[in-house]
Image: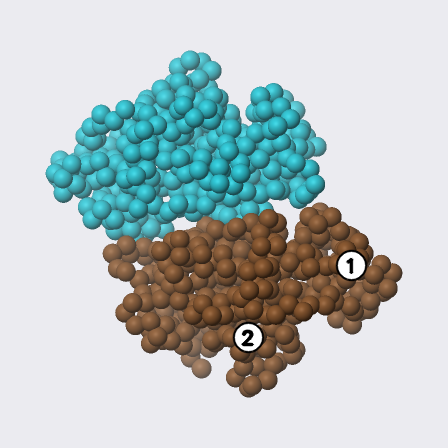
Chain colours: A cyan, B brown
Amino acid sequence: MSVPESNLPLTRESVLEAHERIKPHIHLTPALTSRTLDNFASTPRCTDVNGISNARNVTDDVAARPTVRLVFKCENLQRGGAFKIRGATHAISRLTADQSSKGVITHSSGNHAQALAIAAAAAKIPCTVIMPSISTPSKIAATKSYGASIVFSGSTAPEREAAVRAEQARTGATLIPPYDHPFILLGQGTVALELIEQANAAGRPLDAIIAPCGGGGLLSGIATACKGTGIRVFGAEPRKDGANDCQRGLKAGKRVDTVRSLTIADGLRTPTGVITYGIIEEAVEGVFSVTEWEILMAVRLVVERMKVLVEPSAVVGLAVVLFVEEFRRLVQREAGEKGWNVGVVFSGGNTTLEALTGLFVREGEFMGEQEQLLRS
Amino acid sequence: MSVPESNLPLTRESVLEAHERIKPHIHLTPALTSRTLDNFASTPRCTDVNGISNARNVTDDVAARPTVRLVFKCENLQRGGAFKIRGATHAISRLTADQSSKGVITHSSGNHAQALAIAAAAAKIPCTVIMPSISTPSKIAATKSYGASIVFSGSTAPEREAAVRAEQARTGATLIPPYDHPFILLGQGTVALELIEQANAAGRPLDAIIAPCGGGGLLSGIATACKGTGIRVFGAEPRKDGANDCQRGLKAGKRVDTVRSLTIADGLRTPTGVITYGIIEEAVEGVFSVTEWEILMAVRLVVERMKVLVEPSAVVGLAVVLFVEEFRRLVQREAGEKGWNVGVVFSGGNTTLEALTGLFVREGEFMGEQEQLLRS
């Protein structure tokens, strides 16, 4: 499967260059702050058994100066509902005239496919999305509505890859992979450039950024963008069924290359790529993981306190900041009384009210798992 | 019941002055844009019977240049979850030292009470909220969490007013009314100053602003802020059970002073005030009203396409832009091919996932009402 060749160096300068290319085509998404969440993030010990109910009873204590001050980068408000438009737009901007005329193709069925369809339509080039024939009608309709052609395939990876090859043989379309490619990760990294600037403007110059890690395109791009800035970069993953493959890989000194997890953070079920893992290993300060219940509580806090819609995958970084003692102790140790300004990337918001409600119906189940984890 | 005296002129200058006073205490909320909603707003005839399903099938057609270009001012992302913090903060900033020492009081149980509690806490003055003893525990807890004292009363207006008078006799606290006061409406009007500037920055200098109208504080404030700018101001109301009191009053040439409506836009069930109505009559170009189904469809579009949480009251302006033929014809007539840039104020986001889901369960009921209306 032919992917576009890149000889771009994986440097901050390349991210700045990518930003210039994509800026006219993306939203400058807002960076929000919330005193309620600052206070919660600054309150010690909220993951013990009694602490479970704290997530529901955060108060807006306006008196104290919080030691963890958060700046939320809302890529859930991005075009297409996720940061993915950045990498897709950048990749398309790098195609040769010949490649452009033959169009692009992908076999993702999630946010990357929609982003690629939008970016291709903006560039007026053809886009084909290979989708398993069992995809939900709403996902098929959404992808079609952005102007992409859809080709159905079986749902296993080999079946999808065969469908891509067949289509490429027919049309000569260029495969745009979802994360493990320099064009993609340099595009995703542009989110950090905006966040750094917006945090400065809000009087909260960043000490750290934390972002979700699935395939690692976003996290490795941010780490690349932050090189030489002194800003530390952290990753966040769901823990369920070993979906914390990046964290486990770093611990063992070897990338984990397969994951089978049914975490509710369904955008983060993929293992990190080869290129992205290499960058993360070198430039990311640490990767932490959270439970399903912690993810769900973070979704509720964001939706009901900050009033923005997020998909579960989007809030694993916030869940680390709120619930992972190891991260909290690290901040305390490194930041002291002065505290830290932490940029938190909300990666996407592609969900529905019905889907979120369906998760909250399962809240008791997740809380039971959580209590068992805490006791063990 | 004593309210603070004001000799501020009801002018744009007074709104500018209010803005300087409250700026350090409020969020500069983002102004968002959405091509999907621009396209939908620019597509003719979507309120006929066949058009009902259009709201579910909007496409992101990137080719056409829409004739109605929207800029959404997200006061749902404001501190306290609504624009109300603006008026409350402004009113408190105008109190004398003696008044401040004795504190403030209100008998609202909605967004105004929470806003007043937050503003009073920030100014370090006491705040008392009179609440019907039948209020929901979550509302009581939220108001308490912002640091207010709560005094319970009966739920009729006379009972609540008696409780205010008793409390004022005891403490000398100043009543801060929810909308019909110059301090309040001048504070609410500041939202327009930011929106005008943000729309300019986005390359969409405004031709018009549309905002919800309940008591009229927000709408009259915006109209005051826009005096002399050439920007036309429109109001939006729910129609159910005659909740469109302002629209009806303007038509009859006489303010309607009582409303009993169970509209889902529960923040807009109050009639306009005396002062606010006077300003609206003079300075607002027109007031339009929408059905329950139109409000619900607008909520769904905003939550699922724009990814921000809104309460039903917040989206009546958008519902007018999308569904009211009279408004759409007006834009066509006045704006011609060049089109209009319209600022749409989302007033608040104080709802829960559960509450919204509860409304969507009733979607069939609202659609039935809608079909009957269209046939009649």
Query: Does residue B166 appear to the left or right of B297 in the view shown?
Result: right
Farthest-out residue, bottom: B252
Task: Please state the horizontal and vertical placement of residue A227, each as a whole percent of the image.
Answer: 39, 24
Left or right: residue B51 versus residue A1 is right
Q: Which mark sits nearer the N-terminus, 1 or 2?
A: 1
What label does residue B280 carry, if any? 2
List the residue tagged with mark 1: B99
Query: Which of pointers 1 and 2 indicates the residue nearer the eye?
Result: 1
Q: x and y percent of residue B5 in the render?
A: 72, 68
Q: Is residue A317 visible?
A: no
Residue B53: name its quadrant. bottom left
- The amino acid type of the residue labelled 2 equals Ile
- The residue depicted at 35 percent of the width and 75 percent of the height is B334
Q: Residue furthest right?
A: B170
Q: In which quarter of the image is the N terminus of chain B?
A: bottom right
**Whether residue A193 is situated above or below residue A247 in the rendered picture:** below
Say few, some or many: other residues with alpha carbon within 10 Å of mark 1 (under 14 / 14 to 19 / 20 or more).
some
Give how far across and how far down residue A77 sits, in percent. Answer: 43, 47
Q: Work out whether residue A186 or residue A85 is closer to the camera in this orientation and state it.
A: A186
Q: Is mark 2 on a helix, strand or loop?
A: helix
Asked if the residues shown at circle 1 and circle 2 are in contact, with their CB atoms under 8 angstroms apart, the answer is: no
Residue at 30%, 29% (x, y): give it: A14
Q: Which amino acid does label 1 sit on?
A: Gln
Q: The disc numbered 1 marks a residue on which chain?
A: B
